[in-house]
Image (spheres, grey):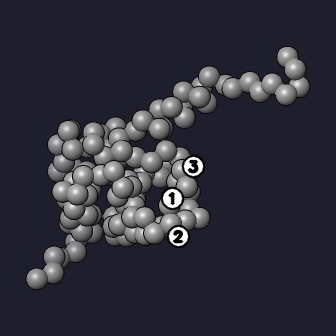
């Protein structure tokens, strides 16, 4: 082996691939917010992989913090290990709105009007 060669542990590589492919369907039981969604809807909610840098002013939803609902990123945040974030970009409008309503329901917020 030459000094500049880097070995990649297969287990680490597998975990990175697995994290990159997670959807809300994979973690349904971890979050009350997801209880009322169909398998198809949950499969359409892609979770951001750990280490992903959030894009400035883009909206995200943190499944671990439904009281925060959707938030605009500052641009310096990264997805932490175990954190479950859904990006507004690439998520169906109706599904995003349903997810926001589910967050409000879980934390007991009433709808205005």
Residue denoted by label 3? 51
Residue displayed at 52% across by 70% down: 74
Disc 1 to disc 2, how far (Cα)?
A: 8 Å
Classify the position of the N terminus by image quarter: top right
Can you tell which of label 2 and label 3 is closer to the viewer? 2
Left or right: 28 with respect to 84?
left
Per the rendering, the mark at residue 74 is: 2
Classify the position of the C terminus by image quarter: bottom left
x%, y% of residue 104? 24, 68
Residue displayed at 17% across by 76% down: 110
Residue displayed at 27% across by 39% down: 43
Can you tell which of label 1 and label 3 is closer to the viewer? 1
Packing grade of label 1 (10 A; few <14, some 14-19, many >=20) is many
Q: Is residue 7 above or below residue 25?
A: above
Q: Quadrant of residue 67?
A: bottom left
Secondary structure at numbered mark 3 = loop
Residue denoted by label 1? 54
Q: Earlier in the sequence, mark 1 or mark 2?
A: 1
Packing grade of label 3 (10 A; few <14, some 14-19, many >=20) is few
Are the residues flagged by discs 1 and 3 in contact, CB closer than 8 Å?
no
Residue displayed at 21% across by 54% down: 95
């Amino acid at each position: 082996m030459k000094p500049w060669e880097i070995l990649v542990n297969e287990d680490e590589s597998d975990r990175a691939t697995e994290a990159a492919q997670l959807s809300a369907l994979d973690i349904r039981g971890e979050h009350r917010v997801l209880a009322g969604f169909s398998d198809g809807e949950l499969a359409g909610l892609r979770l951001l992989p750990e280490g992903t840098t959030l894009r400035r002013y883009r909206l995200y939803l943190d499944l671990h913090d439904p009281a925060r609902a959707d938030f605009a990123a500052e641009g310096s945040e990264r997805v932490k290990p175990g954190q479950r974030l859904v990006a507004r970009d690439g998520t169906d409008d109706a599904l995003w709105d349903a997810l926001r309503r589910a967050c409000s329901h879980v934390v007991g917020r009433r709808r205005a009007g």
